Image (tube, rainbow, N blue to C red):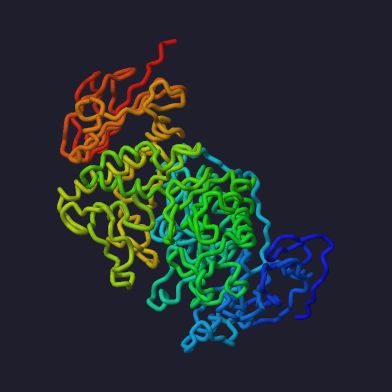
Amino acid sequence: MDLTFSKLDFLKPELGAEYTGRGTHFALFSAHAEKVELCLFSSDGKEEVTRMPLPDREGDIWSGYVEGIGPGTIYGYRVHGPYDPRRGHRFNANKLLLDPYAKQIFGDIRWDDALYGYTIGHKEIDLSFDERDSAPYMAKAIVQDPEFDWSGEEAIRRPWNDTIIYEAHVRGLTMTHPGVPDDVRGTFEAIAHPAILEHLEKLGVSAIELLPVQHFVDDRHLLEKRLSNYWGYQPLGYFAPEPRYQSNGSIREFKAMVRAFHSAGIEVIMDVVFNHTGEGSERGPTLSFRGIDNLSYYLQSPEKMRHTYDTTGTGNALNVAHPMVLRMVLDSLRYWVTAMHVDGFRFDLASTLGREGYEFDQEGGFFDAIRQDPVLAGVKLVAEPWDIGEGGYQLGGFPHPFREWNDRFRDDVRRFWKQDNGMLPALSERLVGSPRQFDHSGRAATSSVNFITAHDGFTLCDVVSYREKHNDANGEGNQDGHSNNHSDNLGVEGETEDGNILAARNRRRRAMMATLLFSQGVPMVLGGDELSNTQGGNNNSYCQDNEIGWIDWSSMKPEFFEFCCAAINLRKSYPLLRHDRFPTGDLTDEHGTAVTWLRADGQNMNDSDWQDGERKTLGVLLTGTGTLAGTQILLVLNAGAPCDFALPKPAHSAWKCIFDSAGEGAVSPAPNAVETVAGQTAVVFLSEEIAADA
């Protein structure tokens, strides 16, 4: 192929491969490279047909423009520079490298020793140098056509207090659904199928949070065990949709998915992994960043630059404090918002993103850049507020506009309904938005993303069916996954036909789901929980792209699904249950909600009551003030034996029971009546101001 570089008559500041209409401009960052070669491949990706040194370097940006090539062109890079691992440099031009800005990926990585910059089995380990060409085994980038018809599609931008998140996996949600055609199951087309959208609309969720859908790699050791990186937390391409989720091989399928969700009134949130990449530690392969500029892209050990600094448990940590790495992250986020129309992001192990060097900094460059960005400051941003490094647990430590996954909500609610002693003080915090963690710096009560279950851990069915994890299928001797799950099997480990145990499990599930949906904050429901899905006690299904990890639609219990629909609808119906300000104890507060804590005799809780570890019943009286005046809601949670609860004097009309998780029906007692509350039950009472007749 006879191609040469040409000069552009205009400035092209973007990194990556950008089609101009007449040709393609290629640009790559590397601060320590000595030469960068663009490699073009045949249409089947097998033959390298052209290798051309990028002619221009300005600062640390290497670039060149090739006229006459466009969408569909397959390419990669070879980067020359020092191979000096002790100083953090791992350049090896024998290794074909994926463009970090690739917007479409061709082919899969086929694991071979040639993919490593050093020689596997050599006595000097990663200090050795491997001369084999990795191109035959590498995935490659494709120049893509950005055109797509977005006419009539608009961003939703729903307020946080009206948001209910549904966490789901593209394959997991669709692989067994009987209404989804077999040939598209497990793809973007499948998850946007009318059968899936109809289910989500009926359930009433407002946003779907997708587990990683950016291009990721399957770990070699998993494939050797006939497993895979099912969850997708090993990223390599931050701009490209994962090819395995495309039924037709086109990134337009992702855009069509987003458009379909928006048409159904559902926002799309992406789980993104900018804390590490799939290249692993210094003993990992050389696939992209390591060979482009290891010292810039990754944090290195402060003691020995040969070794990566790992705060993520995956072998490496992306050096987001570096300005060009930070630019890549921001460019990626903006691309998904502007070109792909997504509505927000959940940041995996987000504490790593806030590390300036090696310590977490709430005022760090990543947070400053996001907050001032006119595109990103207006979308939904959710942090997983921890990593495994020193000082990594930062719940409540992220700045506005970030929301945060609240694992304390998960643990405390599970423990309360499991009847652990002394849980009322912690439970009260969770019910009103965890103010101890979040009520500072002007943050809203919606700062807490509340969840009882997530992809990482037991399903809701398994929380009430297993005391121990059962992860043997993962091939790690059941050593992986959390061991302290605050779960309970209620008498039998796993499946049972005992009617009493099944009834107790169902009652506890209803009580926990009600607690999630009637607490202040933003609720997140794990996809499949509403269907009574089980993973057989596996609480770490990260490698199970099979019936363990997939949602079993045949497990659906209609009565529990309808219960979930009713609870979500009730939350939507009453602003007192989803206010954006923290409740206070002041009835004269004009900001929206006053809270009073009650014991079973209807009297206010006092200090000794809070310290009574045997108490299992709590009343939460929410009184609307200001714009919410005229409504009063009483939530009664009883994790113990059935008891009588004396209803306080209502502020408005007589109390009306509007929700009972025991499923025993609703009764409308008279003012100041005593209501019998079943054990393991959440009950909601309403008192409203009755409008005068016209």
In which quadrant is the C terminus drawn?
top left
Residue 52 in view in this figure: yes
Front-most of residues 226 and 313? 313
Name the quadrant containing residue 484: bottom left
Residue 16: x and y in percent read 67, 65
Residue 189 in view in this figure: no
Residue 560: x and y in percent read 30, 45
In which quadrant is the N terminus drawn?
bottom right
Q: Is residue 588 left or right of residue 332?
A: left
Name the quadrant containing residue 537: bottom left
Looking at the image, the residue that sits furthest to the right is: 9
Name the quadrant containing residue 147: bottom right
Looking at the image, the residue that sits furthest to the top is: 694
Residue 367: x and y in percent read 56, 50
Residue at (50%, 39%) from the top-left corner? 441
Residue 348: x and y in percent read 47, 57
Looking at the image, the residue that sits furthest to the bottom is: 123
Relative to 258, say whether 668 is above or below: above
Q: Is residue 674 left or right of residue 348?
A: left
Number of numbered discs: 0
Front-most of residues 100 and 562? 100
